Image (spheres, rainbow, N blue to C red):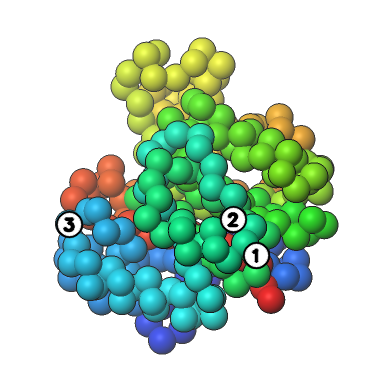
Amino acid sequence: MNLERYTQAGLVWFQWPLLTALPGLSQRIWTRHGGVSPAPYDSLNLSYTVGDEPARVQKNRALVREAMGLAELISVGQVHGCNTLILTDRQEVLAARDLGGIDILITNLPEVGLLIKQADCQAVVLFDPVQRVIANIHCGWRGNVHNVIGQAVRRLQEAFGSRPEQLYAGISPSLGPCCAEFKNYRQEFPAAFWGYQVRPGYFDLWQISVDQLRAAGLRADQIQVAGLCSRCQGEDFFSYRRDKVTGRNATVVALQA
Ligand SMILES: [Zn+2]
């Protein structure tokens, strides 16, 4: 595990040390602890669409926003696709609240938190310290198949002139090679992924994401993998594979003012 763990007023989160060392970026990998939702959403559930009481989700999101000192917290409906939302002015932020069908969030606005909801999927965070822009990517195994990571890097290049070799990336806790079993991988994965099996039917999705970042032009020493499995390493995270009916934790990034 490559993360640092923090606690404050019942809330528990992790950070990537590689990114903590960079000025201007706030990043928190929130655990499920410290919120107000009861089982099976206990307790910091951040999704409105898993059966939890909306007022509790609202309270949990407020806890996250206030703990990070953010003006806004952007969360959209995620669908395992490649559509991108780019926020560059405050009016767009207000309009973004009810959007769905998006898996890449990008902004250059300070104090606007980009929130990706997770229960075993990866959040992949990108930070360009030169152009001062961030991305947060929802990447499940379908996202790896679509190469949503490469798509996000291209959007940063096109919209902000980012140079991939200047980007930093963090890959969040998610389904590890210990638990990422795909019985139908011959139908679900391209043949190029089959070599990522660590034993028959089990895949290293973290390494696939690292290699997709490298293929997009990022430097190996500017990528940090959390190395923490959401399903089997403790009870810090919601896990769809483990519990089926459960909440969603989140990874949030923001540019500081
Ligand atoms: Zn595991």
The answer to which image quadrant residue 10 occupies is bottom left
Vertical order, 131 against 147 (above or below)? below
Vertical order, 211 against 62 (above or below)? above
Among the two numbered marks 1 and 2 on one chain, the one whose residue lies closer to the N terminus: 2
The answer to which image quadrant residue 153 occupies is top right
In this figure, which residue is indicated by the disc labeled 3?
A: 51
Among the two numbered marks 1 and 3 on one chain, the one whose residue lies closer to the N terminus: 3
- Amino acid beneath label 3: Gly
Q: Are marks 1 and 2 in contact (CB under 8 Å)?
A: yes
- Amino acid beneath label 2: Leu
Vertical order, 83 against 189 (above or below)? below
In this figure, which residue is indicated by the disc labeled 1?
A: 109
As drawn, which residue projects farthest toward the front?
A: 91
The span from disc 1 to disc 2 (Cα, nearest Å) is 7 Å
Residue 58 appears in the rendering: yes
In this figure, which residue is indicated by the disc labeled 2?
A: 87
Kind of element beneath mark 2 = strand
Mark identifier at residue 135: none
Q: At x 34% / y 63%, what residue is drawn?
A: 46
